[in-house]
């Protein structure tokens, strides 16, 4: 008996270096042959080639359709033209309207995926005008028109759905990382090679951060933590490696100069080699984010053997699974306390083999994630 083919349209901002993109690009090669992905993105980005290699189509939103209020019409148009069975929506604004349009266009599976756990950390206009709409109308549209509403963590689901989080359509699917692939990439290089590649002294102690350079990721706090750290004069060879790109770059460069940290804070831009950096270059990982729906990078850092210092905005589903490998601090904690935690973290690195085993024995295994997602697609498309 031939398995029914399922065409999925993934809707997200772009195929850059963020957690959502990484998750989907890890998932795509693991899919059974009868499930295929195409993408609708706001703009092209550095990882487009990876998914094009799988034969996917990438639809780029035309300039006249960039407004969030017009996403629904565009999604409906693409569903009708390309006969998508499932729409998997990873954006926030007007998600309920998109689910309604997808249903009207004939998509039998309509999935809204929450990757946020804090609606207060959104742009001001969104906070003032869209959030009230989401709380009063959009949640009910999701409950009515989505076939499934997913949270990447319990907190992410609660953030989106509030009192509707117990609705029969709602569920949590924790992310995961492909352990075998991750381990292979770690073993593909060395610290010596990476130091040479990025112009870093071989004896440096590397405080790592790898994320989009956006206000919500709060790298500004990381700079102040590091400034406090070096003033303690206990880590004279310490540097910060801040991988990623985004709208905060120029402001962060100004802060780096103001703090006289030009020679000690490396900002190489987009990095597509996270496993190698985490497993071979970094000595600890620091994530002072204001919002994280899941934080795939925290999971990857633990798998690489790093000790993690993060804000209490990283969901407890993640940090609570590794109590001996993560220090969680409130964003309001004194800089001295953050600096002390980073110092402690540097001395607590373990071999990647042990980190990989910790993640393999956690609830966040990639095989389980793939099984859950595939079963969901097959169920909603049936």
Image: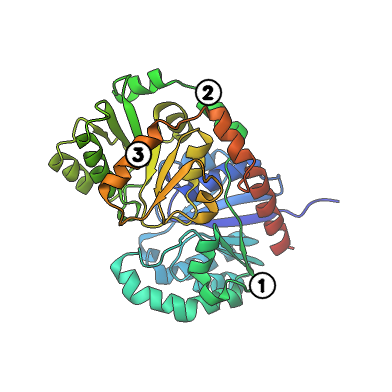
Q: Between residues 343 and 80, which one lies in front from this camera angle?
A: 343
Mark before the other along the chain sequence, 1 or 3: 1
| Residue beneath the point at 35% across and 60% down | 63
Spatial CA span between label 2 and label 3: 25 Å
The mark lying in front, picked from 1 and 3, is 3
Q: Which secondary structure lies at badge 1? A: loop
Residue denoted by label 3: 342
Q: What residue is drawn where x is 34% and y is 22%? A: 195
Q: On the rendered structure, is 92 left or right of 367?
A: left
Q: CA distance from mark 2 to mark 1?
A: 43 Å
Compared with residue 52, is residue 83 higher up or lower down, i.e. above or below?
A: below
Q: How is the image coloured?
A: rainbow
Depth check, front residue: 252 or 129: 252
Let me know if residue 83 appears in the view: no
Q: Secondary structure at mark 3?
A: helix
**Residue at which label 2 appears:** 187
Q: Nearer the viewer, residue 322 or 369?
A: 322
The residue labelled by disc 1 is: 168
């Amino acid at each position: 008996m031939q398995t029914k083919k399922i065409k999925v349209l993934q809707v997200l901002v772009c195929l850059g270096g963020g957690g959502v993109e990484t998750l989907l690009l890890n998932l795509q090669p693991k899919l059974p042959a009868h499930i295929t992905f195409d993408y609708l993105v706001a703009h092209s980005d550095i990882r487009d080639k990876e998914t094009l290699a799988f034969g996917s189509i990438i639809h780029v939103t035309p300039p006249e359709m960039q407004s969030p209020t017009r996403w629904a019409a565009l999604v409906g148009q693409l569903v009708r033209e390309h006969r998508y069975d499932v729409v998997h929506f990873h954006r926030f604004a007007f998600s309920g309207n998109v689910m309604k349009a997808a249903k009207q266009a004939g998509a039998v599976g309509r999935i809204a995926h929450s990757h946020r756990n804090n609606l207060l950390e959104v742009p001001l206009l969104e906070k003032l005008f869209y959030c009230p709409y989401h709380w009063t109308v959009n949640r009910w549209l999701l409950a009515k028109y989505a076939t499934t509403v997913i949270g990447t963590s319990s907190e992410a689901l609660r953030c989106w759905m509030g009192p509707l989080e117990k609705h029969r359509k709602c569920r949590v699917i924790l992310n995961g990382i492909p352990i075998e692939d991750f381990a292979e990439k770690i073993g593909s290089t060395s610290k010596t090679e990476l130091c040479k590649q990025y112009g870093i002294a071989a004896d440096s102690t590397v405080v790592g951060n790898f994320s989009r350079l956006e206000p919500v990721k709060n790298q500004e706090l990381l700079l102040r933590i590091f400034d406090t750290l070096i003033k303690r004069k206990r880590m004279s060879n310490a540097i910060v490696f801040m991988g990623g790109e985004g709208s905060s770059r120029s402001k962060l460069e100004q802060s780096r100069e103001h703090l006289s940290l030009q020679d000690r804070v490396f900002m190489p831009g987009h990095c597509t080699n996270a496993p190698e950096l985490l497993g071979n270059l970094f000595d600890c990982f620091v994530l002072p984010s204001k919002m994280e729906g899941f934080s795939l990078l925290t999971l990857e850092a633990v798998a690489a053997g790093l000790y993690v210092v993060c804000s209490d905005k990283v969901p407890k589903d993640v940090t609570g699974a590794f109590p001996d490998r993560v220090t969680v601090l409130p964003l309001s904690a004194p800089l001295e306390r953050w600096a002390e935690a980073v110092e402690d973290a540097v001395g607590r690195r373990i071999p990647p083999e042990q980190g990989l085993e910790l993640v393999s024995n956690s609830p966040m295994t990639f095989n389980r994630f793939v099984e859950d997602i595939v079963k969901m697609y097959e169920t909603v498309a049936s």
